[in-house]
Amino acid sequence: MILFVCSQGMIRSRTAEVLAQRGGLDARSCGSDIDPAVPVPLSNNLLAMANIVVCMEEEHAAAVRSLAMFGPGCPPVLGVIDVPDIFDPFDHTLISRIVSGLESIRLHEVAAAIRRGAESVAYSDPVIGDESDAPELRHSSRAGA
């Protein structure tokens, strides 16, 4: 399973999760913030299930490293893709940044799955557009990701 981590687990990592799933991968998302508003908080249980952990920013990787479950070989891949918290869910530029970040850390198969997932969604734009055409993809509002 691929675990995507951002601050709140609602925009960046959630976008990556949904598109990776639509692209054929087993993926989950979570938030590293210690905040009751985080729908799925980062946990040792999620880390134990993950084969790959992709963090949107270095602060999220630090949160992963601070958990008891993180250690040699668990998870085997921890990557940071440097995607800032400035996007709306499923924004075309957000998806492009996620894909290019995954490519930069050599997770080419994950990047390809996200591309497939984005192309499979029935949006107004042929590649990706606003999520109003796909309400089942909406997870939350823009209140921090």
Image (cartoon, grey):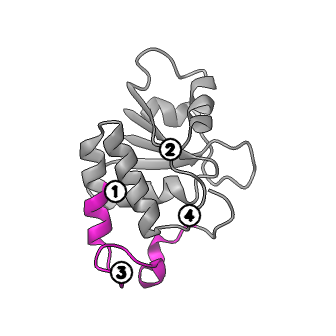
Q: Which residues are magenta?
A: 114-139
State the residue position of label 1.
21
Please name which of the two marks, 3 or 2, marks the residue nearer to the observer: 2
Please identify the quadrant where the N terminus is shown: top left
Amino acid on which the number 1 mark rests in the picture: Gln
Q: Quadrant of residue 140?
A: bottom right
Tell me whether circle 4 and circle 3 mark residues in contact (CB < 8 Å). no
State the residue position of label 3.
123
CA distance separating discs 3 and 2: 26 Å
**Image location (x, y in percent) of residue 63:** 62, 32
Amino acid on which the number 2 mark rests in the picture: Asp
Q: Quadrant of residue 143?
A: bottom right
Q: Residues within 10 Å of mark 2 (few under 14, many from 20)?
A: some
State the residue position of label 4.
87
The secondary element bearing badge 3 is classed as: loop
Q: Residues within 10 Å of mark 4 (few under 14, many from 20)?
A: some
Q: Residue at x 25, y 62 (%)?
A: 116
Asked whether, in this view, residue 44 is left or right of residue 107, the answer is right
Mark earlier in primary sequence (3, 2): 2
Q: Residue at x 35, y 36 (%)?
A: 105
State the residue position of label 2.
82
**Image location (x, y in percent) of residue 21:** 34, 56
CA distance separating discs 3 and 1: 17 Å
Asked whether, in this view, residue 8 is left or right of residue 127, the answer is right
Mark earlier in primary sequence (4, 3): 4
Q: Residue at x 63, y 55 (%)?
A: 39
CA distance separating discs 2 and 4: 13 Å
Amino acid on which the number 3 mark rests in the picture: Tyr
Please name which of the two marks, 1 or 2, marks the residue nearer to the observer: 2
**Image location (x, y in percent) of residue 72:** 45, 14
